Amino acid sequence: MELNDLFPAIQQIENQPAVNDLRSRTYLATYPSILAIGNVNEQIGVDRLHQLSAMVYGWMPRIVRLDPEHMNATLNALQQAQVANHNDYNNVNIDDIANCLHSVVGASKLLHFVNPAIFPIWDSNIEQFRLGMEPPYNQMSRVDNYLEYVGEVHEIRQENNFCNFYREFSRVLQNRLEVNNIEAYEVSEVRAIESAAFELAQR
């Protein structure tokens, strides 16, 4: 996945700003509310892990399953993720979070909401867009595949024309929010890339 692959999302959103599917509209409307719970400048404890897990699994077709055997390791990993940057995000033990949730996709959502500037959300739609085909059966269960995607996202952020992409994507997103009567909010560069990929995966 490269920056040029994402530019068509801008035109697609501009051409179709209204979101008629209630699930898609709910994603748009609830994003800042979940972010407000996750992206707080204090250590994550069990209560906030419960809250975040329940909220992010509201975006998923599966029911959240928190494995108590991995709870302490997950809290430690999420606390590392809160302060991670683009140089050291590989040091976060994402396996612990994925083991607790029994899902790498679920782990990616938790990671995004505790540090939206570093960790993008990952799912089979995005992976299909990246690969240009339906992902193999075990593709979504491997943390190394998620980390490869995270690396691509940060490489895209460094491309020469990224500032233009981010500005234009933010513009059409604000228009989409207004058209759908959702209070305006800004998204991180990482969220813009992931959202563009998701948008294009729906074509």
Image (spheres, grey):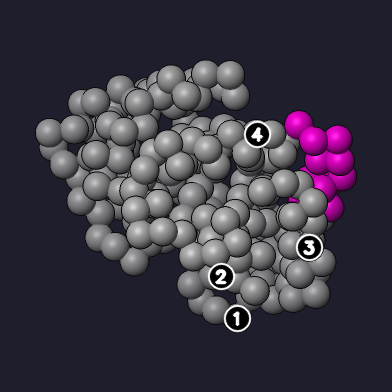
Mark 1: few, some, or many residues within 10 Å (few <14, many ≥20)? few
Give the Cα separation between the discs numbered 2 and 4: 27 Å
* Residue 64 showing in the rendered view: yes
* Residue 198 showing in the rendered view: no
Secondary structure under the numbered disc 4 in the rendered image:
helix
Q: In this view, does 111 lie above or below 7?
A: above
Q: Label 1 amino acid?
A: Asn
Q: Name the residue under label 3.
A: 8
Q: Tell us which disc is closer to us: 2 or 4.
A: 4
Provide residue 9's location: percent of width, then percent of height.
74, 62
Total of numbered circles in the picture?
Answer: 4
Q: Mark 2 points at which residue?
A: 25
Q: Residue visible at 50% across and 47% down?
A: 121
Provide residue 11's location: percent of width, then percent of height.
82, 66
Secondary structure under the numbered disc 3 in the rendered image:
helix
Q: Give the range drawn in magenta.
A: 158-170
Q: Which quarter shows the C terminus? A: bottom right
Q: Tell us which disc is closer to us: 2 or 3.
A: 3
Q: Tell us which disc is closer to us: 4 or 1.
A: 4
Q: Residue visible at 34% across and 53% down?
A: 138
| Comes first in the chain, label 3 or label 4 | 3
Q: Does the magenta stretch include residue 106?
A: no
Q: Residue visible at 69% across and 34% down?
A: 155
